Amino acid sequence: MAAAGAVITGVFWMPSSTPADVSHHAGLAGDVTLPPWGFGAHEMGSRAAVNRLPAVMPEFFRDARHQLAWLNPEPDRWRDRNANEMDQAWTYDHYADLENVPTGAMDAPDRFIFLRLLYEAGVARPERDAGFVYYRILELHERLTTSWRAWRAAEPNDEQRVWLEQRIVQDAGLLGHYVMDASQPHHTTIHFNGWDAETPNPEDYTTDRDFHSRFERFFVDAHIDEVTVHQATRAIPNTIIELDALRRAVRAHIDASHARVAELYRLDRDVGFAPDAPAHPDAVAFTVERIASGSSMLATLWWSAWVASGV
Ligand SMILES: [Zn+2]
């Protein structure tokens, strides 16, 4: 199970100016004052996703690339224990601890039925032990599709069309955050910041409670080049309109990230993710692939919401 009270840098692809200790699963440690935010992999991933959009995507959206990148870390700005109601409402939307998810629970049609299944399965702390990133992605995708549909229906010179464009960019930016989070393997596992102390560790993986931030923040800022990330993104393979297909694609995105948890720990043990030493090519390749995977999925979901709104 996720360690109670464990503290990590719970922000994926967080810029280097952000506080080191932000809780992922439990209460925060120490006072956190929110500094200004830089870029880092969240913004990198967003810009790479815009680059992958087909030219027929409405121009205002592609022109919003800087705003979309700025919005990508936005949900992390809501993680503030001094604003308890806000913090608690959304803090569990950033991850999926798949080891804690009972078989079949993610077939639940919405987050509330999912939560009920966690209770029925006897999960120790249902609100926090499993995580809701899967549902958060689906919810925002549907909201985005809904706004696109209204935008298509509005008259070209209707001022509501401009308001809808603001709505669309806002929701698309937020969606981007969670899609990028899910591409970081630490966000899909109970081993979210060093190997879980209650789990056998025959491979002698690190139990350091700084692994999360060392990988996603310091290593990325020191060694990952944005051009390389752009080149590693995949072309949008097809449009996903059917809800079942969309669900499968989002699940596959999370599962693919989870499948690389052991590799992440193995690389850390064998070649390291050190920000202040030359980077091993395998560590760079792993990280670039993960960020690019988030970008590719994000481009696919943005594009699919637009297409779905027209059918
Ligand atoms: Zn996050």
Image (cartoon, rainbow, N blue to C red):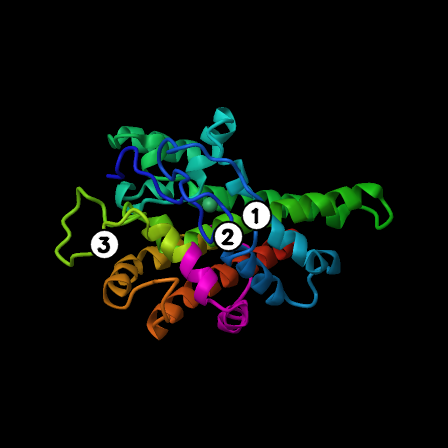
Marks 3/1: CA–CA distance: 29 Å
Mark sitting earlier along the chain (3/2): 2
Q: Amino acid at mark 1?
A: Trp
Horizontal side of 219 relative to 118 (left or right) equals right
Q: Give the mark nearer the N terminus: 3 vs 1.
A: 1
Mark 2 = which residue? Answer: 15
Q: Nearer the viewer, residue 241 or 305?
A: 305
Towards the viewer: 4 or 297: 4
The quarter of the picture where residue 135 lies is top left
In the picture provided, is 235 more to the left or to the right than 266?
A: right
Which residue is disc 3 drawn over?
206
| Image quadrant in which the N terminus is located | top left
Crowd band around label 3 with a 10 angstrom C-alpha radius: few (<14), some (14–19), many (20+)? some
Q: Which residue is mark 1?
A: 37
Residue 310: in sight, yes or no? no
Give the CA distance from mark 3 to mark 2. 23 Å
- Is 287 drawn above or below residue 161 in the view shown? below
Which picture quadrant has residue 289? bottom left
- Of the 4 image quadrants, the one containing the C terminus is bottom right
Q: Are marks 1 and 2 in contact (CB under 8 Å)?
A: yes
Q: Which element type, helix, strand or loop, lies under badge 1?
A: loop
Please tell me whether mark 2 sits on a helix, a strand or a loop.
loop
Locate residue 175, reporting x and y percent.
55, 48
Q: Which residues are magenta?
A: 217-244
Q: Is residue 73 visible?
A: yes
Asked if residue 225 is among those painted magenta in the image, a careful observer would answer: yes
- Give the residue drawn at x 50%, y 69%: 225
Q: Residue furthest right?
A: 157
For label 1, count other residues whose C-alpha is less than 10 Å away and answer few (under 14), some (14-19) or many (20+).
some
User: What is the x, y in percent for residue 97?
Assistant: 32, 44
Please state which amino acid type lies under the numbered disc 3: Thr
Where does the image place residue 305, in percent across and percent down from the top left? Answer: 60, 53
